[in-house]
Image: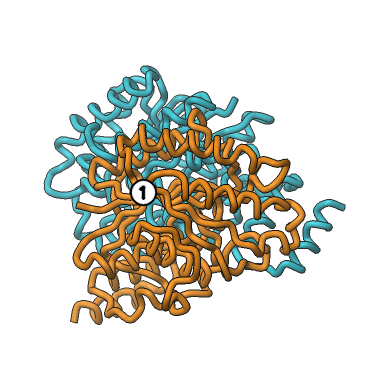
Chain colours: A cyan, B orange
């Protein structure tokens, strides 16, 4: 039975890290829900926008796999870039879509957690004052609709780089939102906070870069695994980009990567056939 | 109100054409359903596999836009590579997922057609003998579940290149499946057949290349628009790759393309800012 996790929030959960900056994670124990069925995960996990990239979920899953040998984890991508808490209201399409996906996933997996990262779109106009109230309704509805009253919800902090980017003026109240996120996690059952301390962005000053996303994923896992708030960097996290690349790839993983290269038009038929015979020999 | 179309079937509906082979289609009147909401379409439309590419739906939509000026079309991507008719059975996850997506889409659009391309995975073991029976159940269920008893269903033929590729031995009965597809379209209400005559594949010998997919999309549109079977190439289709690139891009489209380049890490912040000022001037 696959152990599944619902991924919700806005762009930094969907992922905008650049692929070229970190080693690929391809692990046949990590699946992703596509059209209601489980496929071996390749990044990007989300496809909310054409430029979706590295998010926190792949290294979260790789860390989970190290702890749970021979088990399988499944990721349910439902985060969507630029979305406010109002966009996530329980009568709106984002929430409904996430519930539909999670229910479909539950037919072939055990739903074990919800990873949430959202807030950037609520860092102005004193929206933080309503964060707790709005988010409470969403969390309550997730647990009720999915019939998972005690499911852990892991809540990531917004990076404190946000106000200093070239669009920083759009995010004046990020610190206030972070206070609300921490307070929410501390005062609601099975909700855990994950610090973004020290994480750094892409040149846009908004989106976590790939190296930071790999680290963030480890912190999310630490919070889930220990069921506690993560308020400071995790020991060994500086090596996060290597979380899954000291392992020898299985034949199945090698074939997945090769198929991706060939079907994507990056290698010739001759090269593809040569590589297949190498993998099989 | 957006006019929406459900895309279902296997890999040649999902799309495997290479991006480098055809001009991009970016038209703000063409939307795609992402997380239950409509976004400006960029290809790939599907993301069933990491190597999803050009399918027939983008040029279908561009042709629709030429006919329906100032209207908006919405695409609902639910095709999934390598899937057999059994995988699409009405109690399975693919069918359920497609229904959920289409129902969600219907909350903010008018569903006007279903584009189907499937069959490659049923071209052996005499599976064609059961194609009509199995497909009838699926079509009936789509119409019933979506409360669209008369919705047009456009059914594409399998390319006759299939048996001559390096994996051709896996598809011995493609001609028999094509006969079933044509027969089905001819004998069921509001079902229309689209020939794959003359279309050509990627080096894999399985997936339609980008140029052929652009042509195929025009043929699908011709069948939908005229509500008739398309049994031979459409007049002017040889120019299909230019279906949408003689138009001047709107400011919104230019920004969408620029955002994609910057958020994807393909241009620097400096270049991004320079281009923004050019677009705005």
Outermost residue, right side:
A281
Q: Considering the image in quadrants, where does the N terminus of chain A appear?
A: top right
Q: Residue at x 49, y 64 (%)?
A: B231
Image x and y of residue A269, in percent: 72, 67
Image x and y of residue B170, in percent: 73, 51
In this rendering, does residue A22 appear at all? yes
Q: How many marks?
A: 1
In the rendered image, the vertical position of residue A244 relative to residue A264, given as above or below: above
In the rendered image, the vertical position of residue B117 relative to residue B210, given as above or below: above
Image x and y of residue B192, in percent: 43, 53
Q: Residue at x 43, y 26 (%)?
A: A228
Circle 1 sits in a helix, a strand or a loop, which is it? loop
Label 1 crowd bin: few (<14), some (14–19), many (20+), radius 10 Å: many
In this rendering, does residue A231 appear at all? no
Question: Label 1: chain?
Answer: B
Q: Nearer the viewer, residue B96 or B250?
A: B96
Q: Which residue is mark 1?
A: B152
Outermost residue, left side:
A125
Image quadrant where residue B150 sits: top left
Q: Residue at x 41, y 54 (%)?
A: A208
């Amino acid at each position: 039975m696959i152990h599944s996790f619902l991924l919700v929030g806005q762009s930094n959960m969907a992922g905008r890290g650049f692929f070229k900056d970190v080693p690929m994670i391809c692990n046949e124990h990590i699946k992703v829900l596509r059209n209601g069925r489980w496929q071996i995960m390749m990044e990007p996990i989300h496809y909310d926008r054409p430029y979706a990239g590295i998010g926190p979920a792949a290294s979260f899953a790789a860390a989970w796999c190290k702890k749970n040998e021979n088990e399988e984890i499944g990721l349910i991508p439902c985060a969507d870039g630029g979305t406010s808490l109002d966009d996530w209201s329980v009568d709106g399409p984002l929430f409904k879509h996430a519930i539909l996906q999670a229910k479909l996933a539950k037919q072939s997996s055990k739903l074990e957690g919800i990873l949430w990262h959202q807030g950037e779109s609520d860092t102005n106009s004193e929206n933080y004052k309503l964060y707790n109230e709005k988010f409470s309704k969403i969390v309550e509805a997730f647990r009720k609709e999915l019939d998972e009253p005690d499911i852990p919800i892991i809540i990531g902090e917004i990076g404190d780089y946000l106000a200093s980017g070239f669009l920083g003026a759009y995010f004046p109240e990020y610190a206030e939102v972070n206070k609300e996120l921490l307070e929410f996690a501390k005062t609601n059952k099975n909700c855990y906070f994950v610090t973004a301390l020290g994480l750094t962005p892409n040149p846009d000053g908004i989106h976590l870069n790939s190296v930071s996303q790999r680290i963030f994923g480890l912190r999310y896992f630490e919070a889930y695994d220990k069921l506690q708030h993560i308020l400071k960097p995790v020991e060994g996290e500086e090596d996060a980009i290597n979380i899954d690349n000291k392992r020898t790839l299985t034949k199945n993983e090698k074939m997945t990567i090769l198929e991706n290269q060939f079907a994507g038009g990056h290698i010739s038929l001759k090269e593809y056939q040569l590589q297949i015979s190498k993998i099989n020999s």
